[in-house]
Amino acid sequence: MAEPTVKINLANPTEVARETLRRLALRRIAPTPDNYQTLYEEITGAPGVAATTAITATAASALSGLVMDLSLHHPELAGPVEILDQAIRKSDWAQCRKQLSQIALQLKQRTDGSGGEEDLTLLRDLLAKTLEFGLIPQLSHHPALADRAQQLASAVRDAGSASALRNTAASLKSLWIDVDQHASHLHDQQETFRRILLLLVENIGELLDDDTWLRGQLDMVQEIVAGPLRLQSLQEAEKRLKEVIYKQSLVKHGLREATATLKATMTTFVSRMRDAVAANDEYQGKIASHIERIGSTEDVRELNRILENLLEETRTAQSDTRRAHDQLIQERDAALQAEGRIRQLETQLAEMSALVREDPLTRSLNRRGLDDEFAREASRADRYASPFCIAVLDVDNFKALNDKRGHQTGDEALIHLVKVAKEELRLTDHIARMGGEEFLILLPNTPLDEAMGIVTRLQRSLTKKYFLDNNERVLITFSAGVAARAPGESQEAAIARADSAMYQAKHAGKNRVCRAAQAPMQAAE
């Protein structure tokens, strides 16, 4: 087999010496000084002791240069190279031969490519597994691309050399182009499906009453579909919805039973009333009959019999009336109990609908709950001319926290923030999650200065109540903007002013509370 050609600088004795040693290894020639000298002259085309302008290239000087080169480029040969250097200095050519033999053997193993073959096998296996376990499962909805990926994985495994592996590059590039196009098409399909689902949910919501129990579930579905689809949020929403649906099914079953009981009670009540009226009509008929008999007879005994019958029928009528009265009272009480049960069940349905107005992660209000509470507090503030403030909070350096400690830790930090806020805020205050790491606090019946103090105290409490991640204290801070809502000001306008003040706090160094600018005069119109 011909030796591969290597371009070297013949004027550089180090390069010549390295090439000489390489040829010794390739030709499997004993690395004696004579053999080394012969190959050296073969490479340079001149005697080994040839003068240049300032360099005398001898075998000893070349070997010294080789020592330097090996030390620089092959630190793993430091031990044999050091012994070779000492042998050169002592002109101990026997030792030089021994060390050159060891060095040549190690370099030969590298030249034979045993390490490269292992690297190639590893690379081939990793590429095949990437295709089989990383790509093909993602193409289950596209059998043609999945088959191409499987064929390519088989070709990669069968590639026995680097050149054979390189031949699969074109097929791999073509596959990735088609996969990218398919992924783009699939993304468009998902976005279209998302928009259709949102439109469907919105249209169904418009057909429902504001107090219907179904609206809560629709609000949660709409919030999840509109936001980024994260697996944990979807699983939590699914769990919450299943729990609420199960509880509501129990309540609805009880509601149906209570309604059926009320209907049966009302039916019995009407029946009793009808019987009472019928009995009264029968009694009146008998009285009329007795009056006719009294008018048509002159017999005293007959009159006595009529009187006795009349008294008996009167007593019977009184007893029936008293019994009917008692039964009607019982039926009335049963109807009232059924009505109370229905109201209780309706209240439970309303409470369960409120459950899905919370953010499933932090248990703060979600956007739907925020809108409801803001409208209620704003209406109260306008009606009684009382102050009403809001505060926009944004967690500082949240992205860095996620990147460093993971999204799970980031979620737990948000849960910790809401927990501390609920402990520190008043019962009349509300905290809602606006999205991501941004929250809104509603502070009804609170002047601006007092609201600033409340949010500042919350900041201090958060720095004292450490958030723990794997038993490590992590300081969580936030920047906030506080705005006093003007009479008649819309929710969007008030939040926008508070949000602008929050960004001022961010630019001022974070972990600060800034006061929002006053609302323009037209806000109250």
Image (cartoon, helix red, strand yellow):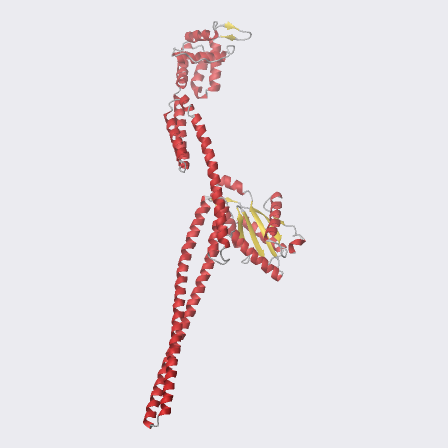
Q: From the viewer's perspective, is residue 37 above or below residue 157?
A: above
Of all residues, the one furthest to the right in this rendering is 521
| 366 on left or right of 341 | right
Locate the N terminus and report the quarter of the image it occupies. Answer: top left
How far across and down, in percent of the image, does residue 346 sit?
A: 45, 62
Q: From the viewer's perspective, is residue 286 above or below residue 441?
A: below
The residue shown at (48%, 55%) is: 215
How far across and down, in percent of the image, does residue 61 sit?
A: 49, 10
How far across and down, in percent of the image, does residue 39 sit?
A: 43, 8
Is residue 181 something one can see in this rendering?
yes
The residue shown at (40%, 58%) is: 250
Taking depth in this image into account, of 332 and 273 the one nearest to the observer is 273
| 83 on left or right of 390 | left
Is residue 425 something one can see in this rendering?
no
Locate the C terminus and report the quarter of the image it occupies. Answer: bottom right
Specify the quadrant of the image occupied by residue 302.
Answer: bottom left
Taking depth in this image into account, of 309 and 436 the one nearest to the observer is 309
The residue shown at (56%, 56%) is: 375
Taking depth in this image into account, of 142 and 129 the one nearest to the observer is 142
Specify the quadrant of the image occupied by residue 167.
Answer: top left
Taking depth in this image into account, of 424 and 386 the one nearest to the observer is 386
Number of callouts: 0
How far across and down, in percent of the image, does residue 41 sit?
A: 46, 6
Q: From the viewer's perspective, is residue 288 above or below residue 229?
A: below
